[in-house]
Image (spheres, coloured by chain):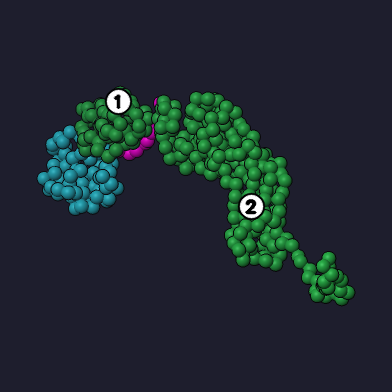
Chain colours: A cyan, B green
Amino acid sequence: MEKLEEKRIGKVHTGFCSYVQDLPSRPNSEKLKDLILAYCGIIDLGFEIPTKDYIKGAVEYYKGNVRKGDELTPCALGDS
Amino acid sequence: MSDRSNAKDEWDELVGAIKEIRVTGVDAKITDFAVVQNVPEASSEHYPFYKCKVHADSSLDLEYRVRISISPSLSGAETTKTTGRMRHGTTKDIYFAAKPPDLGLTSDRTHTITAVYLDAKDPRTGAWVNLRTYSRSDTFKVEKKVTCWEKTPHYANGCELLRHYAGDQCEIHDDGMFAATRDYNNGNITVAEVDFVAKAWGKDINTICANCCTPAPKGRICEEHDIPSSAKAGTSINIGVCVENTGKIKANYWVDVRISGPDYSTTLTSAKKSIDIGKKDKIYVRWDLPLNLKSGTYTIDAVLYA
C-alpha cells in the first residue's frame, strides 16, 4: 500500500447551509421569509435554526456579503 | 669569438674557424605522467585514461605533439595529442581518452603505456621533429563490460545496478546519474558500472535490461469529482473521487475520504478499483448522514492509495 496523494476535494452543505447556499447568487426573499417563520416555529423546514444569527447570516447571504454570512452561521459558502 | 690559428685539411687547403656559435637545444619537456582511471569496454563515451604536462620551450613559441605507445594496443584509444601553439615558458595538461569497443573480454585487461614522445613542429618546414622520448611503464585496465544478468564488481548483476539508480518508474533521471557519478568518484562503483548506468540515463531501464524493473503504481487525484453540493441528514449520498492513473502499469487504487464539519468527523474507505494506464475514473464511497447531523458545511478530503 502506497499513499500517493492527499487533497481537499470539496464540501457538502447540510440543513440550513444547504438551504441558503444559493442565496448569494440567486437572492430570494421568500426564502428569508420562510426562515423567519421557521425560526418562530410556524413552519418546519426540516432543520433547526437555533439562533437569530442564522437569520442575520441568511440576510447577509441575500445581500451578497458571503464572508459576513459565513461569520454568523456554521456555513462556509465563501470559498466554494 | 675566439682566435684560432689556421690549419691545413687533407688536401692541404687552409681552413680556419672564423666564429664559434653556442647552440642551445629546445628545452621543452614532459612531466607529471599519470594514469587517470581505467576505461570500460564497450564504452558509451570517451573516458580519459592518461595525462601528462607539457612544458613549452623557454624562449620559442612552438606547437607540440605528444604521442604514447600502448601495449597491447587499444582500439578506440587516443595515442596522439597536439597542444596547439604554446607560448614560450608556459605549460599545458594533456589528456588521452579512450572509447573502447566491445572487445569480448572475459575479465579486465591490463594495458601499459610503454613510451611517451614529445615532438615539436618546425615552424619553417611544418615537419614534426621528435624532441624527447620517455620510457614509461604506466598501467591501466580496460574493465570488462557490465551486462544485465552477470555479476558486476559491486552488484549481483547489471539489472540490480540499474535498479539502484532508477526511480520508482524504472527510469534513470539526472539525480540517479549524478548519484552514480558521485559513487564512482568515491570509489563505490567502477567505471564499467558507472558507464552501464550512463547507457540507461534518461531511459526506462527495461529498454536496456528487459523485464528488469516493475514500475510502482502512480496516480493522482484529478478534478472531476462527483460530489453533491448539499445533502439532508438521515439520507445517504455517494461521493465520487476522480482518480487518474499517471503511471506505467494498470493498478488498483482506493481512497480514504474524510468528512468533517460541526462536531462531526468520519473517514470512509472505498473498495479497490482497477484503472488503466492514462485513464481517469471515479472511486465512490457512500456517506450515510446521521439523523442528528448538524446544519453546516462539511469538508471532504481524500487520500489516494495504490
- Which is in the foreground here, disc 1 or disc 2? 2
Residues B174 and B61: in front is B61
Residue labelled with disc 2:
B66
Give the Cα distance between marks 1 and 2.
Answer: 65 Å
Q: Quadrant of residue B7?
A: bottom right
Residue labelled with disc 1:
B274
- The rendered magenta stretch, by its main secondary structure, is classed as strand
Q: Decide: is B231 above or below B90.
A: above
Q: Is residue A32 left or right of residue B274?
A: left
Instruction: Tally the marks.
Output: 2
Camera sees residue B270: no
Q: Is residue B290 left or right of residue B184?
A: left
Camera sees residue B80: yes
Q: Position of residue B45 (x, y in %)?
A: 51, 42
Residue farthest along the left direction in this orientation = A30
In the image, is residue A8 part of the stretch drawn in magenta?
A: yes
Does label 1 or label 2 sit earlier along the sequence?
2
Image quarter of the C terminus of chain A: top left
Image quarter of the N terminus of chain A: top left
Q: Position of residue B43 (x, y in %)?
A: 52, 38
Residues B225 and B211: in front is B211
Mark 2 element type: strand
Magenta highlight range: A1-9
Q: Decide: is B265 above or below B181.
A: above
Q: Residue placed at 16% from the left, 39% from the top?
A: A38
Q: Residue placed at 67% from the left, 51% from the top?
A: B117
Q: Residue placed at 61% from the left, 31% from the top?
A: B108
Label 2 crowd (10 A; few <14 / some 14-19 / many >=20): many
Q: Decide: is B68 above or below B88.
A: above
The residue under label 2 is which amino acid type? Val
